[in-house]
Image: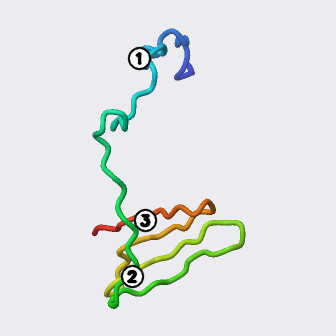
């Protein structure tokens, strides 16, 4: 039985593009086309907050829900930054 990979060489793989070109992100912050970060919003009166993970020396993860549906996931990082993930269904 012949191997599936028989006859293939490393040169037979398609080129992934020019390797000498620098990486360019989809949004280039120097060009000003990146959207500004969303402001942190505290839970409103009809929202409930559940702490999913909170250990010393690690991130704190909170689930914010409204009508028993998770609307946001808030991650408090060690350096004081907050990652706010909005959930859309």
Q: Where does residue 50 sit, x and y in percent of width and height?
A: 50, 83
The residue tagged 2 is: 43
Q: Earlier in the sequence, mark 1 or mark 2?
A: 1
Which x, y percent locates residue 88? 29, 67
Measure the C-alpha gap from mark 1 to mark 2: 46 Å
Residue position for label 1: 17
Query: Looking at the rendering, in which quadrant would you find the N terminus?
Result: top right
Q: Secondary structure at mark 3?
A: strand
- Marks 3 and 2 sit apart, C-alpha to C-alpha, by 12 Å
Q: Report the side of 57 relative to 71 (left or right).
A: right
Question: Which structural element holds mark 2?
Answer: loop
Q: Residues within 10 Å of mark 3 (few under 14, many from 20)?
A: some
Q: Are marks 3 and 2 in contact (CB under 8 Å)?
A: no
Mark 1 nearby-residue class (10 Å; few <14, some 14–19, many ≥20) = few
Residue at position x 34%, y 85% in the image: 44
Rendered view: 35 above or below 59: above
- Nearer to us of marks 1 and 2 is 2
* Sequence order check, earlier mark of 3 and 1: 1
Percent across and percent down for residue 75 are 52, 67
- What residue occupies the far right of the structure in this picture? 56
Residue at screen point 33% across, 84% down: 66
Which residue appears at 41% of the width and 17% of the height? 17
Mark nearer the N terminus (3 vs 2): 2
Write the residue at 61% across / 59% down. Answer: 79
| Residue highlighted by disc 3 | 84
């Amino acid at each position: 039985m012949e191997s599936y990979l028989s006859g293939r060489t490393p040169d037979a793989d398609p080129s992934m593009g020019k390797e000498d070109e620098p990486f360019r992100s989809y949004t280039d912050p120097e060009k000003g086309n990146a959207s500004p970060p969303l402001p942190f919003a505290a839970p409103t009166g009809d929202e409930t907050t559940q702490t999913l993970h909170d250990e010393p020396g690690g991130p704190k993860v909170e689930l914010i829900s409204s009508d028993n549906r998770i609307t946001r996931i808030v991650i408090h990082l060690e350096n004081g930054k907050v990652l706010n993930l909005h959930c859309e269904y």
